[in-house]
Image: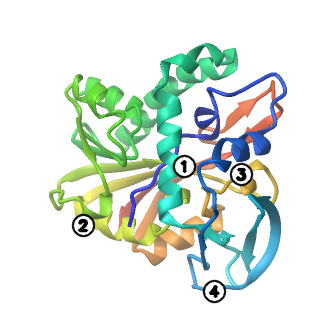
């Protein structure tokens, strides 16, 4: 199983934004050459395993029809079918390349450039959230990317480590004495019961097997440790339903049920956490911020 994470939509696309912005077209154009021919696999409801659901959205990509369906039993939304793991890896590798290519910097719009400032401010808020439950201790962030949260936590005395699929950010972070584990999280030999907090921001919805992640996280957390999640609060409409890389779409009810099924107890839920708002492009994406403990 691969360890997937994805930069938020505007980070993914930041190097190719133009005045005539069309999110769906831009996503498809960015990925079309990377995943041809399109190979897919069957998918099912994350909560009950049901493979049949009511269609709420559909889109065509490289002559292949993809649907977002909602399970009639429990309301879980998911992408049907899904790309193969090999194709998802190609997509993420392309996005890493775009985010590290200095020749593309001049194409950034002012809004997306300002988004780096937003990320730094978000990092402070996220560490504040963690510290409302835990004083400084051992923090692991899965899908740490450029390490905004880890850098902020390190300043405050935390022992920090990151997990990444690719080594694109490893060198920069290790210059700041931040250890980065590169590869498949599920296959990593990390110390059991070692972490006071494990964070995953904008990651859970991209994973082919979220249950396997939670199972491993339980083993890595100390007995009184916490898991911190940031995930989209997906409605039945919106641009996120057009994303090939969002495999599962959670709302408040389905994320609570998913956590309970995997023996986590939500302690705090913020439904207005980290919503991305773009006045210029008339786009808003609500998110949920969740802190949970092991039952």
Of the residues tagged 3 and 2, which is closer to the observer? 3
Residue drawn at point x = 66 percent, y = 41 percent: 30
Q: Secondary structure at mark 2?
A: helix
The residue nearer to you, when weighing 220 against 164, is 164
Q: Which residue is mark 2?
A: 219
* Number of numbered markers: 4
Residue 242, located in which quarter of the rendered image?
bottom right
Q: Work out whether mark 3 precedes mark 2 in sequence or the reverse, and give the earlier one.
A: 2
Residue 225 at x, y = what percent?
28, 56
Residue 9 at x, y = what percent?
63, 40
The CA distance from mark 4 to mark 3 is: 22 Å
Q: Work out whether mark 1 precedes mark 4 in sequence or the reverse, and give the earlier one.
A: 4
Q: Secondary structure at mark 1?
A: helix
Q: Which residue is mark 4?
A: 50
Of the residues tagged 3 and 1, which is closer to the observer? 1
The CA distance from mark 3 to mark 2 is: 32 Å
Q: Which mark is residue 91?
A: 1
Q: Residues within 10 Å of mark 2 (few under 14, many from 20)?
A: some
Q: Which mark is residue 276?
A: none
The CA distance from mark 1 to mark 4 is: 27 Å
Q: Is residue 213 above or below residue 123?
A: below
Q: Is residue 167 above or below residue 111?
A: below
The CA distance from mark 1 to mark 2 is: 30 Å
Of the residues tagged 2 and 4, which is closer to the observer? 4
Residue 251, located in which quarter of the rendered image?
bottom right
Check contact, mark 3 vs mark 1: CB within 8 A. Answer: no
Q: Is residue 78 above or below residue 280?
A: below
Q: Which residue is mark 3?
A: 240
């Amino acid at each position: 199983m691969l360890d997937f994470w994805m930069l938020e939509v505007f980070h993914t696309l930041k190097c190719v934004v133009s005045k005539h912005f069309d999110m769906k077209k831009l996503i498809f154009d960015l990925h079309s050459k990377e995943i041809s021919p399109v190979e897919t696999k069957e998918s099912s409801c994350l909560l009950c395993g049901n493979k049949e659901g009511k269609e709420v959205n559909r889109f065509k990509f490289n002559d292949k029809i993809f649907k977002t369906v909602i399970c009639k039993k429990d309301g879980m939304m998911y992408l049907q079918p899904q790309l193969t793991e090999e194709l998802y890896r190609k997509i993420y590798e392309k996005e890493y390349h775009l985010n590290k290519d200095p020749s593309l910097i001049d194409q950034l719009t002012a809004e997306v450039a300002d988004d780096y400032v937003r990320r730094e401010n978000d990092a402070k808020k996220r560490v504040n959230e963690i510290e409302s439950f835990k004083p400084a201790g051992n923090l692991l962030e899965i899908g740490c990317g450029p390490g905004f949260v880890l850098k902020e936590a390190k300043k405050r005395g935390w022992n920090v480590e990151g997990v990444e699929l690719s080594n694109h950010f490893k060198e920069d972070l290790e210059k700041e004495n931040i250890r980065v584990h590169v590869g498949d999280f599920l296959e990593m030999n990390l110390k059991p019961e070692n972490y006071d907090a494990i964070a995953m921001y904008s990651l859970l919805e991209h994973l082919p097997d979220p249950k396997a992640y939670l199972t491993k996280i339980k083993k890595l957390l100390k007995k009184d440790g916490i898991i911190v999640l940031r995930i989209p609060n997906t409605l039945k409409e919106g641009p996120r339903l057009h994303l090939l890389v969002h495999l599962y779409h959670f709302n408040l009810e389905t994320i609570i049920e998913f956590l309970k099924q995997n023996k986590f107890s939500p302690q705090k839920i913020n439904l207005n956490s980290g919503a991305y708002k773009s006045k210029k492009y008339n786009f808003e994406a609500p998110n949920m911020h969740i802190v949970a403990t092991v039952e």
